[in-house]
Image: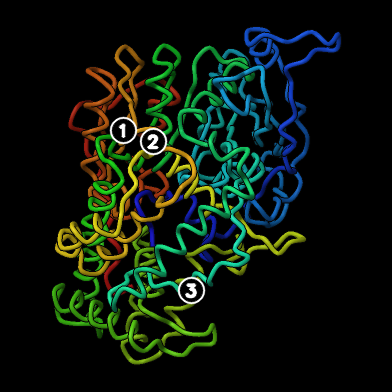
Amino acid sequence: MPTARAISTAVLLSTATLLASSLTACAPAGRDGDRQGHGDTGGTTTDAQALSRLREQSPAWRDCPAPAPVQGGGEAPGALPDGTRWQCATLRTPLDWNDPSGAAMDLALIRARTSAAPDDRIGSLLFNFGGPGGSGVATLPGLAPDYEKLRTRYDLVSFDPRGVGNSHGVRCPDAGLPDEDEIDDTPDDGPEETDALVRFNRKTAAACAKSSGDVLPHVGTTQAARDMDLLRQVLGDDRLHYFGISYGTELGGVYAHLFPERVGRAVFDGVVDPTHDLMEEALAQAGGFQLAFEHFAAWCARQGCALGDGTEDIVDLVVGLEAALDDTPLTTDGGGLDGDALVDAVSGALYRQDYWPALRVALEAAADDNGEALQDLAEALGQHGTDGGPADADADGRESNEEDAFRAITCDDSSERYSVADVRARLADFVEASPIFGPGLAWGTLSCDGWPVPGAARHPEVGAPGASPVLLVGNTGDPATPYEGAARMAERLGRGVGVELTYEGEGHGAYDSGNACVRNTVDAYLLHGTLPEPGTTCEAEPLPEGK
């Protein structure tokens, strides 16, 4: 179940069986944290000299190999339909931007070049697909068909942000920790369950510090935004052209705040509300997921599904089913389906309306004491490999570090450290917002308890007066980044910067839904600089009845 932040539609697709194409990645980046503060002559390099050298570096682009297990595994990317091959490289960047002449790290990059003539080429279009924690290097090739029109004028570029995947990925080894499946995400049966959740979070934080203590203080969004500006310069662009989805909108907003004069054509899709702290964001998500589920339930009732005659009936059934499964899990081939797995499956299926028919079938079966389909759905939409099965493991048995990176970046960004008392004080608000999703999201705010790095602030700073316009796409049915976030991002960016486009649809984000109106509007801005008129709205095509 998502906690305070949520993965984007693109990242979710990268783990779902419904994604047809395999994702790909670069070879591992350096993890040596080597010093670059000394030149060949032994003299100390100044910060200015170090920055100059970083800006002058030339990445060694090469054909991409298969993704590393830390990025999720899979096969090497095949050529695009016109024969263009994916290229991978690394970008050398300071480990700590406050000490640019100190230790350095490498970020994994990927790109597909445009075939446009020099006069038609705009530059590079940098993607961040959300998370935080998703590997952009692994995600971009699998989603490239969605962005092929944009490649007519841009090189398509993405990267593993610091702490993610092959960019010195954070690791929190689980040796000595209880199995996460044994921890109740919604402890409601006494202090033993609550104490177990607290111990798990604190032991996880200690494991992260022990394994990744060198990088852990330096994986926050502000440092990642500075990496993006270095990448812009190394790629030879005067301005950063950018497409951010979900958490990628927060990263883009922080970049705009730091470098307003360097903002090029930028699109934020599935917009994070920058006015929220972690508790407020989690509460808003509870309402967003509840609204999305009620939309699903209304559709299901119209189909004559066996879950109930109306929205309220179906909501009540799922609330009751979750409680029953918490007491007595259903036996499945995968071990067992409990209430947490049910919520994982339902929340994952709400990221795309295409998943609704599968969710209906799985819930009907679970209500009839057969948990196999719902278990399969939870696994397909969870932390698993790109082919829908378990992720490939490295020599130590480790898989993708997306979950570890999510925690590390979130806790580095947020200065809030919530206690059990804080959660209990707000729990009724969460249950009121969503009896299905509220409790899990409330207790999820404990995930930074015991984190060894002080967080940066209550919420991100995104004010960017004077920046070029940023197109903000808000989806009225978005469960993970509720629609109101787009308006608040526009307000915080500053007068004349944020331009809103409304999508009246379902699922997380809008561009990847395939809606022609959204795509044409976004493409018009990125390719030609044409912004939509104020108040422009795109309507989704309804899911066919009877499907």
Q: Earlier in the sequence, mark 2 or mark 3?
A: 3
The answer to whether mark 2 and mark 1 are in CB contact below 8 A is yes
Spatial CA span between label 3 and label 1 = 38 Å
Whether tag 2 and tag 3 are in contact, CB under 8 A, the answer is: no
> Label 3: how many residues lie within 10 Å, few (<14), some (14-19) or many (20+)?
few
Numbered badge on residue 348: none
User: Which residue is at the front of the view, 160 or 179?
Assistant: 179
Q: Is residue 281 left or right of residue 147?
A: left
Q: Amino acid at mark 1?
A: Leu
Residue 181's tag is: 3
What crowding class fits label 2: few (fewer than 14 Cα within 10 Å), some (14-19), or many (20 or more)?
many
**Residue situated furthest right in the rendering:** 41
- Which residue is labeled 1 in the image? 472
Where does the image place residue 86, in percent across and percent down from the top left?
Answer: 70, 39
Disc 3 or 1, which lies upstream in sequence? Answer: 3
- Residue shown at 32%/40% (left/top)? 272
Task: Give the image location of residue 159, x and y in percent.
Answer: 59, 36
**SS of the residue at dot 1?**
strand
User: Which residue position is annotated with label 2?
Assistant: 249
Q: Residue at x 41, y 70 (%)?
A: 196
Is residue 286 in sight in this rendering?
yes
Mark 1 residue crowding within 10 angstroms, few (<14) / some (14–19) / many (20+): many
Task: Inspect the image, locate mark 3, and give the three-letter code of the amino acid beneath it.
Answer: Asp
Quadrant of the image occupied by residue 61: top right
Task: Name the residue at 36% across, 75% down.
Answer: 192
List x then y, in percent, for residue 374: 42, 78
**Vertical order, 366 against 382 (above or below):** below
- x, y percentage for residue 225? 49, 27
Residue type at mark 2: give it.
Thr
| Residue nearer the viewer, 77 or 302 | 77
Q: Nearer the viewer, mark 2 or mark 1?
A: 2
Tell me which corner region of the image, top left, top right, bottom left or bottom right, holds residue 442: bottom left
